[in-house]
Amino acid sequence: MTTETKQGGPRAATPCLAGLCAGLMRRDLAPGAPWLSTLPVLLGAVLALLLASGMALAVFYDPRAAQASLRFIALEVPAGWIMRGYHVTGAGLGFVLLYVHLFRMLLTRGYRGPAAAGWMLWVTLLAALLLAGWLGFALNGGLGGYWSLIDAISASLALSGPAGGVAMWFFGGAPGDGTLARLLVFHAVLGVAAAGLLWLACAATRQARPAPAGRMVAFWPVYAAQAFAALALLALVFALLMCFAPHWGQGAQSQLPASSLAVPAAVSYPWYLTPLAGLTALFPGAGGHALAVIAAAAALYALPWLDRSGGGAPGGLYRALTWLLGLDVLGLGLSAVCPLAAGLQILLFVWFFIHFLVLTPAVTAMEAA
Amino acid sequence: MMRHRFLAPLLAAGLLACGAARAENTLTPLHFQSDGWRGSIDKAAAQRGFAVYQSVCASCHGMSGLHYRDLEGIGLTPEQVAGIAASIKLADGSAATPDSLFKPPGAVNMGGAVPPDLGAIVAQRPGGTRYVYEFLTGFGPAPDGMTLLPGHFYNRAFPGGQVSMPNVLRDNAVTYADGTKASAAQEAADVAEFLTWSSDPDLAERHIIGLRTVIFFALLAMVALAAKRRIWREEG
């Protein structure tokens, strides 16, 4: 075989590979993007790991004996503890990446104008991953997840009308032997959907990029080198957490067996669900919870139109308020871990909506003027 | 005494007949080989701890998920495991095999309190290994002014101070085959190490793999950062 056929063969056979290579070498990217712009790539890597380890776990997981089968995986399945570690640590770190990326989009106003479609996809991704994360919390079979699920099912089955119908379809009726088997399917479907959503969100953001102007660079090797270094750092943090803090951020009840007799005073959530838990805590019942979630999602979806600034760069006041919003969300999370004074809890909740519905339009209009 | 029913066959099976190695002193000051980020299971202690579990605790507490063959994880040979299993009578009267799950205890209910499964107890209690040790050595006379509920015992480590499990560890409650002196505190430390293993059998492997992986990725990250800086200087 000559070198010629060796080189020509695969390229002719795989034109899309050649197209991909050409795309990676095209000089259409502005130089000097910050490290944080690698977050979507890192999230993609973590999602891929979650899907792969999730498939491996699903082979051995038994929804009818959730915690016992997870113990079986840890004790009996070769490298089972590694699969669990990938999945658990991947979920925790994935949410770190997602929250930081969303915060950065808020801070840099990465949701405006043509990027609005991308922003809405990111918000949808957040919703999908939060739901998948909550289902994972329930599938873990720990005491907290069990009671969170029981509460959610019994509250939502009390709903009437179409909302009750949706809840009935989702949970498949009163909690029983088949509930977790059903939710496992949703968990997996949401995981795959999240990968698709991430891809769409990145594609939409790419579409919204300003036309190339001035000196441009190609992905290869400039941003490939950056992404590779970021991935190596992520892997370092991943290994540290997985091997030396395997229960990090999972909530105090995740190790306790689910039991219908031991009713915890309060469910302790994994850290990434705490802001959501804090946001919904003020409204009892499934209807109230759903309302709070829908209102928060609506505020996030509407953000591109709530921002009245036109094209200008974000001003100092807007940035300060965004940092305050970050603290507000942290506070909401904290309120789900240790109960705060009722007044403070209400303030945190109300502030979240004031930020989007009142302050954002007012401050952006003021700073644009 | 019923508790010793298991002990003779265990010893006969040659359990712990691995020489006269004496326990390293883990009691003063109290420390466990499994402590910390480089911790691993002290297999000799875990084997002694299994003897304590089997002869003292197993009549009340189960160990869900564990098979007798899993004891190879604390350094027992397949022959020793087979001997241990053969000495255990299952509920249907047949002898256990290495592939049997640990024999569950009969239904025990002490004044409404059911003994918890000990399989993952170290992961389930704040304080882990140390808490189990302190719980097992925490029995004593109730302080003045404390009225014990009926069927309860004072324990200074247990939240609330009153527990329905009696103090079960005494000096020489077991005889250790490796010659270690079986003080009550030694038994408590050994069974705590055994329960640490059963909660987290991959502890040692995880720490070793973790250390190697962290070193590898730290080096890789340094190289990748250097490469990135260089490429950006030339192209960026």
Image (spheres, rainbow, N blue to C red):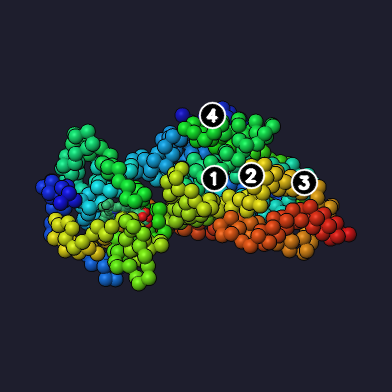
| Residue farthest right in this picture | A369
Q: Which residue is mark 3?
A: A302
Q: CA distance from mark 1 to mark 2?
A: 12 Å
Nearest the camera: A245 or B134?
B134
Secondary structure, mark 3, is helix
Which comes before the other along the chain, label 4 or label 2? 4
Which comes before the other along the chain, label 1 or label 2? 1
Nearest the camera: B104 or B96?
B104
> Where the C terminus of chain A falls, by quadrant?
bottom right
Quadrant housing residue A165? top right
Q: Which residue is mark 2?
A: A285
Quadrant housing residue A243? bottom left
Residue type (three-letter) at the residue carrying disc 2: Gly
Residue type (three-letter) at the residue carrying disc 1: Ser
Q: Which residue is mark 1?
A: A148
Residue found at x 22% / y 49% = B54
Residue type (three-letter) at the residue carrying disc 4: Gly
In percent of width and height, residue A129 lies at 60, 43
Q: CA distance from mark 4 to mark 3?
A: 51 Å
Residue found at x 17% / y 56% = B174
Which comes before the other along the chain, label 3 or label 2? 2
